[in-house]
Image: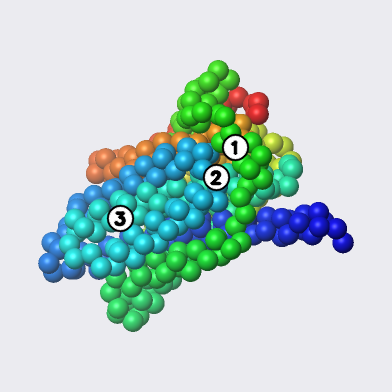
Amino acid sequence: MTTESVAGRSTSARRGWVAPLCWVTIALEGFDLVVLGVVIPSLLKEPSWGLDPGTAALIATVGLVGVMVGALVVGPVTDLVGRRRAMIGTVVVFSILTLACAFAQDPWTFGALRFLAGIGLGGVLPVALAMVNETAPRGRAGSATTTMMTGYHAGAVLSSLLGIVVISSLGLGWRPMFVIGGLIAVLLLPALVLRLPESEVFAQQGGKGTGNPVAVLFRPGYRRATLAFWLASIMGLLLVYGLNTWLPQIMIAAGYRLGASLALLLTLNVGAVIGLLVAGQVANRIGTRTAALVWFVLAAVFLALLTVRLPGVAIYGTVLLAGIFTFSSQVLVYAYVGQRYPDAARATALGASSGVGRIGAIAGPLVTAPLLAAGVAFPWGFFLFAAVAAVGAAGVAAAGRTTA
């Protein structure tokens, strides 16, 4: 066997680690999405902290702002220093600062640490998306992206289950949740250092003589696409966070019992996982742009259908279909962004789309609150979400076809 063939097999073996390692890093973001909701009831009971729901919501928002900053900053850094270095760096930052959250002695320190940890965590997504896009077999970037994003939901489920065991069953309080989250990231680091290869695309082309990768986003041929992707991402993340926050309350307003409303939220998220697995395969066959358009349009249709008070099985089926098409729409946007830009600006484009899209994540829980206060969340909340999905479809259409 020649030296060249051995080296080729070694490179191929290391490339095989990209998908599972990126899946785990995305699971960290899913864990972090849910962990604050899991610990907030305990935080509100901290006698010396004096938190109320308003200040707790402020801490949650500060964390999301940190994630937004991280995505915007780490994307360009990734295109300049490489995917591997950026991934290791973001996980180091997230792990240390998440562990530090467990030892915060007041809400202001805790909020500051959540913001800083969010910067590291926000950088994970654009790096992972860039690496998976660049290592996926030809024609399979769509399914590679959507499969990786199932890690997000796995992390969310893990956080919920740990909360039940650690806080409810064992009565250990909220601090161990951040110790566990930080340790998971710490344990991931050796695998990243030893097994994660640099992207061959970056090694060959990225970061070489391209100057500022941010400027690429606004060059002729990309400017309109950049703005269109930002619009689509804002709409996509508004749907994810808005529905996860308010679906049970809207269904209660529609006359469903609390138990049924919570079961419908579970059904929505089961649909999200199914949608991710199906959407990628569809994107491989009909193209990522077309799949994203179809997914946003069907999300609008099924969200609009929820304005009708449906009986029994029909409501569960409609919510399941809404979950299938709503949540994976945004992931298809990420997959399309990864294909739309040149190699040297891919992570920058993904970071910008993810970061600017966090405006929708922050707005999602806010936009429906006035409708609930006015007593018209049903049906107008679903009309609002359907309109948001329609605008998302318009954003994808405006982005144009892949040119690079």
Please identify the quadrant where the N terminus is shown: bottom right
Nearest the viewer among 374 and 46 is 46
**Counting residues from the N terminus, which is met first, the one under dot 3 or under dot 1?**
3
The residue depicted at 61 percent of the width and 41 percent of the height is 202
Judge from the rendering whether residue 219 lies leftward or rightward of residue 7; answer left or right: left
Q: Dot 1 corresponds to which residue?
A: 206
Q: Dot 3 corresponds to which residue?
A: 114
**Could one spot residue 127 in this view of the protein?**
yes
Q: Position of residue 117 (x, y in %)?
A: 35, 55
* Element on which disc 2 rests: loop
Q: Position of residue 324 (x, y in %)?
A: 57, 49
**Counting residues from the N terminus, which is met first, the one under dot 2 or under dot 3?**
2
Nearest the viewer among 394 and 27 is 27
Disc 2 residue crowd, few under 14, some 14–19, many 20+, Cα 10 Å:
many
Q: Position of residue 184 (x, y in %)?
A: 45, 68
122 is higher (above) or lower (below) than 167: above
Please identify the quadrant where the C terminus is shown: top right
Asked whether the beta carbons under mark 2 and mark 3 sit within 8 Å of each other, the answer is: no
* Element on which disc 3 rests: helix
Could you tell me the amino acid type at mark 3?
A: Arg
Separation (CA) of disc 2 from disc 3: 26 Å
Residue 261 tag number: none
Residue extending farthest front: 3
Could you tell me the amino acid type at mark 2?
A: Gly
Could you tell me the amino acid type at mark 1?
A: Gly
The residue depicted at 30 percent of the width and 42 percent of the height is 366
Asked whether the beta carbons under mark 1 and mark 2 sit within 8 Å of each other, the answer is: yes
Separation (CA) of disc 1 from disc 2: 8 Å
Separation (CA) of disc 3 from disc 1: 32 Å
Residue 82 tag number: 2
**Could one spot residue 245 in this view of the protein?**
no
Depth-wise, is mark 2 or mark 3 nearer the camera?
2
